[in-house]
Amino acid sequence: MEKSNAIVITGGYLASSNAKTAHGLIRGTDRFNIVGFIDSKSAGKDAGEVLDGKKRNIPIYATLEDFLKSGQKAAYCIVGVATKGGVIPESLRAELKDALQHGFHLVNGLHEYVSDIPELAALAQQKGLEIIDVRKPKKFKDLHFWSGKIKEVKCPKIAVLGTDCALGKRTTTRFLVEAMRKAGFKAEMIYTGQTGWMQGAKYGFVFDSTLNDFISGEMEHAVVTCYHEAKPDIIFIEGQSALRNPSGPAGAEWIVSADADAVVLQHNPARKQYKDMEYYPAYLPTVKDEVALIKIYGAPTVAITLNTAKMTEQDARSAAAQYQTELGISAVLPLEDGLDSLVPIFEAMIKKSVAHA
């Protein structure tokens, strides 16, 4: 697919976890060519350096006007933040209006739709510009109910779950696909959030804006369609939230409805309570406990991937060694070491699935 140039607005949040959509786009997208960020607090830096200290030649501008003065051209302006409750704050509305006035198409992944804001919708229509609200649910007639067709899928299906939300499950899923492709296998990712779509994943749906009755069916439909069209050797399914996160428990559908053959579990040992719920007396389970729960649901956990935020590398490595000893499965640091070391696990599963086909 031909990539269009895009800029990303982050409203001063680029250096925080609220900009996880932006962070995903910095790490890579097959849908857009990101040529700049608009973020007043990080202006003058490189977006890659703000994310993880690695220069990626994506400049950050203080304002849209500064970007326009740079001589760079872009067709799309992407909202790169996930605000609390998915609301578009007034400050961001002003930036979106500015972007429309300068002829940019808008891409928005928040729960609040730009196309539902009369002033912005009218301006886009007047200028012949497109507003893509990624989270807009499908029409009822286009939704799928679970049917059992998941049994047609003969290649391994791996669910990438986590012990909480905002842990890097999507990044790990993408890394796993890249590692398997590098090793010569046909691997595909099923996206379940707006950023996965923005990164160019072809198969999937937006989990948290799908009617509950159709989540299992949409999950199944995405996996089955991917299997028949792309004919992959292996499919990785991006997880959402966590089995025990009280504000939005999720994970059972991946194991039960998508019939996952195995799970990769993402965890941050430094995080003790669920994100943004430190006021509530609920604590993240131990990895051993979560692996046991996942097994009860019907899938073995074949690897632990560690999010190392707020940890020294030494502490993260000793936590990984401890999980490996305690559970007898691989425990790795995706951002620090990549995921090539997990390839043999999935290679063995692929060989087994081919032998039984």
Image: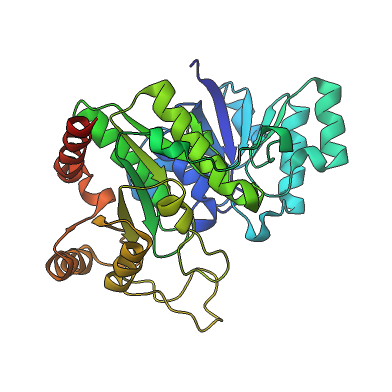
Position of residue 291 relative to residue 109, above or below, is below
Position of residue 74 relative to residue 320, above or below, is above
Q: Give 19 or 228, whichever is nearer the viewer.
A: 228
Which scheme is used to colour this image of the protein? rainbow
Q: Is residue 355 left or right of residue 24?
A: left
Relative image position of residue 223 (x, y in whole percent): 44, 36
Q: Is residue 127 left or right of residue 252?
A: right
Q: Is residue 82 left or right of residue 126?
A: left
Q: Give 134 or 54, whichever is nearer the viewer.
A: 134
Q: Is residue 291 visible?
A: yes
Residue 234 figure quarter: top left
- Point out the residue furthest to the top here: 2
Position of residue 264 relative to residue 156, above or below, is below
Q: Is residue 309 visible?
A: no
Q: Which residue is at a point 13% across and 63% down the rendered structure image? A: 328
Q: Which residue is at a point 14% across and 41% down the rendered structure image? A: 344
Relative image position of residue 31 (x, y in whole percent): 50, 26
Q: Which residue is at a point 75% across and 35% down the rendered structure image? A: 98
Q: Which residue is at a point 12% across and 68% down the rendered structure image? A: 325
Relative image position of residue 252 (x, y in whole percent): 46, 58
Relative image position of residue 227 (x, y in whole percent): 40, 28
Position of residue 325 relative to residue 49, above or below, is below
Q: Number of callouts in the render? A: 0
Q: Give 23 or 283, whichever is nearer the viewer.
A: 283
Residue 69 figure quarter: top right
Question: Which part of the image, by quadrant, shows the C terminus?
Answer: top left
